[in-house]
Image: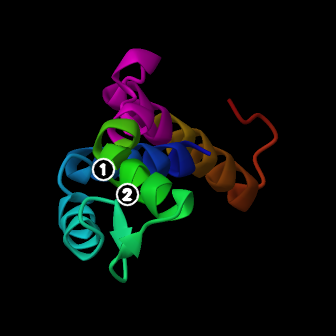
């Protein structure tokens, strides 16, 4: 579980580091193709196109907010220590079982 928590922590931080730029090019392309969400094939764009354009332009804000875990109080060093501690306990237990010791402490 400690490794899984570290993996999730790393994934979220990677996404957070890219969130402010990941949607810039797609938003620009859609904006150019639809005159900023107002036209589609030289006619007035329907609400779906307009909503998609607005959503895509707001993705950098909303995705950054969703990927910001700084307020959760996650302590990376503590996660790493937890993994190390769990491995030590597991290794000790495995060694005890292998040696068939009667008093494993």
Residue 16 percent coordinates (x, y): 29, 44
Q: Is residue 90 magenta?
A: no
Image quadrant for the N terminus? top right
Label pair 2/1, CB-CB below 8 angstroms: yes
Q: Is residue 79 magenta?
A: yes
Q: Residue, x 67% and y 55% (percent of image)? A: 94
Of 89 and 55, nearer the camera is 55
The region drawn magenta spans: 64-84
Most prominent secondary structure in the magenta stretch? helix
Which mark is drawn over residue 53? 2
Whole-percent x, y for residue 33 in the image: 26, 76
Local SS, label 2: helix
Local packing at callout 1 (Cα closer than 10 Å; few below 14, some 14-19, many 20+) is many
Mark 2 or mark 1, which is nearer to you?
Answer: 2
Residue 10, placed above or below residue 68: below
Q: Can you tell which quarter of the image residue 32 is in?
A: bottom left
Name which residue lies at 30% across and 50% down. Answer: 57
Quarter of the image for the C terminus: give it.
Answer: top right
Q: Is residue 101 above or below residue 26?
A: above
Mark 1 falls on what kind of element? helix
In which quadrant of the rendered view does residue 77 lie?
Answer: top left
Q: Nearer the viewer, residue 20 or 90?
A: 20
Placement of 67 over or under 15, stated as above or below: above
The residue pinned by badge 1 equals: 57
Q: Residue at x 52, y 64 (%)?
A: 46
Looking at the image, what colour scheme do you see?
A: rainbow
Residue occupying image coordinates x 42% and y 24%: 74
| Mark 2 vs mark 1, CA separation in Å | 6 Å
Q: How would you rate the neighbour count of disc 2 (Cα within 10 Å): few for under 14, some for 14-19, many for 20 or more?
A: many
Give the number of the disc on residue 96: none
Coordinates of residue 90 in the picture (x, y in percent):
62, 47
């Amino acid at each position: 579980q400690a490794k899984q928590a570290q993996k999730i922590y790393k994934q979220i931080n990677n996404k957070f580091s890219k969130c402010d730029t990941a949607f810039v090019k797609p938003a620009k392309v859609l904006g150019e193709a639809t005159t900023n969400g107002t036209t589609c094939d030289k006619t007035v764009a329907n609400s779906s196109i307009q909503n998609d354009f607005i959503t895509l332009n707001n993705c950098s804000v909303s995705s950054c907010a969703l990927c910001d875990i700084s307020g959760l109080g996650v302590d990376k060093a503590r996660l790493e220590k937890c993994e190390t501690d769990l491995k030590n306990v597991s290794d000790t237990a495995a060694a005890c079982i292998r040696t068939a010791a009667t008093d494993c402490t």
